[in-house]
Image (cartoon, rainbow, N blue to C red):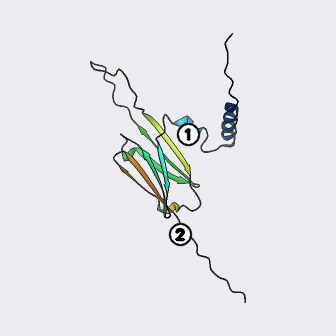
Amino acid sequence: MSLVHYEPYNLFDQFNSDISRLLGSPRAGAAAATTDWAPAVDIREDENRYLLVADLPGIDRKDVDITVEDNILTFKGERTAEQEDTGKGGYRRRERVHGEFLRQFTLPDTADMENIHATVNAGVLEIEIPKQAKLQPRKITVN
């Protein structure tokens, strides 16, 4: 007889995943089914913008696709593996991850979707999302 370790919180995670998959959430299933790894991302906010900074070492800018649809910012791409050396001096250990990746972020209503721009420098992707100008309150006179 083998012992099974019971973790009640896993039931909540499984339930949430099942409901999201049934309701067709863009984050459920799609990301899990098409990704092999996920790059680390930092998110910063200041008074004028949001800034997403992602580590993408070894990935060329042409291999990254960034889209915005229904207030969801998506960036995806692929890191290709180096050719396997079958001769002398082949790999004994391989830790660097390769394959497809996908990250999605829901943008706030204050984000200016029309002026998002991205840059890559030394394997770091920066996506700058400006904030919309705040509407100034105005006084309305009653006639």
On screen, 65 above or below 136?
A: above
Q: Residues within 10 Å of mark 2 (few under 14, many from 20)?
A: few
Secondary structure of the residue carrying tag 1 is helix
Which circle's residue, 2 or 1, is located before the other in the chain?
Answer: 1
Q: Is residue 53 left or right of residue 31?
A: left
Residue at (33%, 28%) from the top-left corner? 83
Quadrant in which the N terminus is drawn? top right
- In the image, 43 versus 104, the foreground residue is 43
Tell me the kind of residue under disc 2.
Answer: Ala
Residue at (67%, 83%) from the top-left corner? 140
- In the image, 40 versus 88, the foreground residue is 40
User: Residue 2, which numbered label?
Assistant: none
Residue lying furthest bottom in this view?
143
Q: Nearer the observer, disc 2 or disc 1? A: 2
Quadrant in which the C terminus is drawn? bottom right
Query: Where is residue 16 drawn, in percent x and y?
Result: 68, 38
Residue at (34%, 22%) from the top-left corner? 91
Residue 29: quarter of image: top right
Residue lying furthest top in this view?
1
Residue at (69%, 43%) from the top-left corner? 23
- In the image, 59 versus 44, the foreground residue is 44
Tell me the kind of residue under disc 1.
Answer: Ala
Number of marks in the rendered image: 2
Q: Which residue is mark 2?
A: 133
Q: Is residue 121 left or right of residue 102?
A: left
Q: Which residue is mark 1?
A: 31
Q: Is residue 18 left or right of residue 55?
A: right
On screen, 88 above or below 129?
A: above
Could you tell me if the residues under marks 2 and 1 are in contact, i.e. CB atoms within 8 Å?
A: no
Residue 30: quarter of image: top right
Query: Where is residue 33 drawn, in percent x and y?
Result: 56, 35
